Image (cartoon, rainbow, N blue to C red):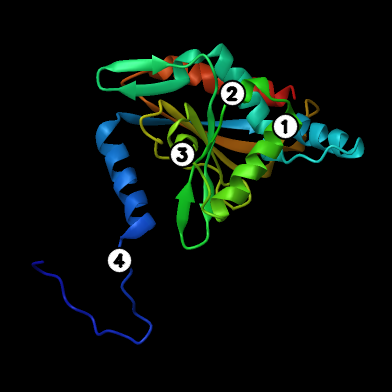
Amino acid sequence: MAGYAEVPATPADRVVPLRGVRGMIADKMLRSLSEAAQLTHHADCRADALLRRKAALTETGVKVSIEDLILDRVVATLLNHPDLNGIVKGKEVHLSGAVHLSVAMALPGNLLVAPAIFNAEKLTTEARAAARKDLAERARANKLTVPEMTGGTFTVSNLGLSRVRYFTPILNTPQIGILGIGRIAEVAFPDGKGGVEFHPVMGLSLTFDHQAVDGAPAAAFLSDLCAALEAA
C-alpha cells in the first residue's frame, strides 16, 4: 500500500486467521451489511419499573434476569408490530405469526451465536428464561441444531453488563430487526420542585432493514417497547 510504512515486529505480535467458526461469523457480518438496507434508531428507556418487577419476583422465589424481563416485553410488542417480526427473501417480506426470538450469545474464543427460542409468545417468563439458559448451555457445548441457528424471526443482543449505552447491532439477516440492549445508568430528571432526582435509564438500539419497514413504524415499535418496559 502506497505511503504505508512497515513497523518493526515485536514478540507479542500475532496473526489470527479468519477461518473456521470465526471466519463464518466474519462472512455473515459482511454479507449482512451488503444484503440489507440497515438503519438504527436509539432510545432512552427508564428502568425503574423493570428493576422493581425483578425485585418483586425474587422475593417470591422466581429467579429471572433483567434480560428475561426485557424479552417478555419484546415478544409482546412484536405481536403488536408484526411488520418487524419476519425475514426478507429476495423481493419478498415473509412475516411470521409466531415469535421465534433469537438471543445473541458470546462464546469463548471470540465467537458469537444467536439461537432461537421458538414460539416465544406461548411461553411464560420462567419458561422462556429456562429456554434461554438451555440454549446458552448447549451453545457452549456446541450442541445447537441448524433450525435453532437459522429459524429466528427477530434478534435481541444484550450488552447491558458492559459500559456500552448505545450501539449499532448488525442485522441477523435475513431477519428484519435486531434490538440492542445497553447498560442501565442513573440519569438526572427534573423533580418538579426546581431540583433534580435520579432514575435508572437503559439505552436501546433498534437496527432494521429499510427494505422491509420504514423509519416511522420502526420508531413506533421502539417507543411502544419503551412504554411497555416503563410500565413493567
Q: Are marks 4 and 1 in contact (CB under 8 Å)?
A: no
Residue bearing the label numbered 3: 149
Q: Which circle marks residue 67 in the picture?
A: none
The percent position of residue 28, horizontal first and vertical second, equals 33, 44
Q: Which mark is residue 17?
A: 4
- Relative height, residue 138 to residue 49 (above, below): below
The residues tagged by marks 2 and 1 sit, at their Cα atoms, a distance apart of 11 Å
Q: Position of residue 54 (x, y in %)?
A: 80, 36
Q: Secondary structure at mark 4?
A: loop
Residue at image location 33% in from the left, 51% down from the top: 24
Could you tell me the amino acid type at mark 4?
Pro
- The residue identified by callout 2 is 119
- Disc 2 to disc 3, C-alpha distance: 15 Å
- Name the residue beneath numbered marker 1: 127
Separation of residues labelled 3 and 4 (CA atoms): 24 Å
Disc 4/disc 2 C-alpha distance (Å): 38 Å
Local packing at callout 2 (Cα closer than 10 Å; few below 14, some 14-19, many 20+) is some
Tell me which residue sits at (32%, 86%) in the image: 10
Q: Are marks 1 and 3 in contact (CB under 8 Å)?
A: no
Spatial CA distance of label 4 from label 1 is 40 Å
Q: Mark 1 falls on what kind of element?
A: helix
Q: Is residue 11 visible?
A: yes
Q: Amino acid at mark 1?
A: Ala
Q: Is residue 163 above or below residue 217?
A: below
The image position of residue 18, as x and y in percent, is: 30, 61
Is residue 190 among what the camera can see? no
Counting other residues with Cα less than 10 Å from the Cα at mark 3, is it few (<14), some (14-19), or many (20 or more)? some
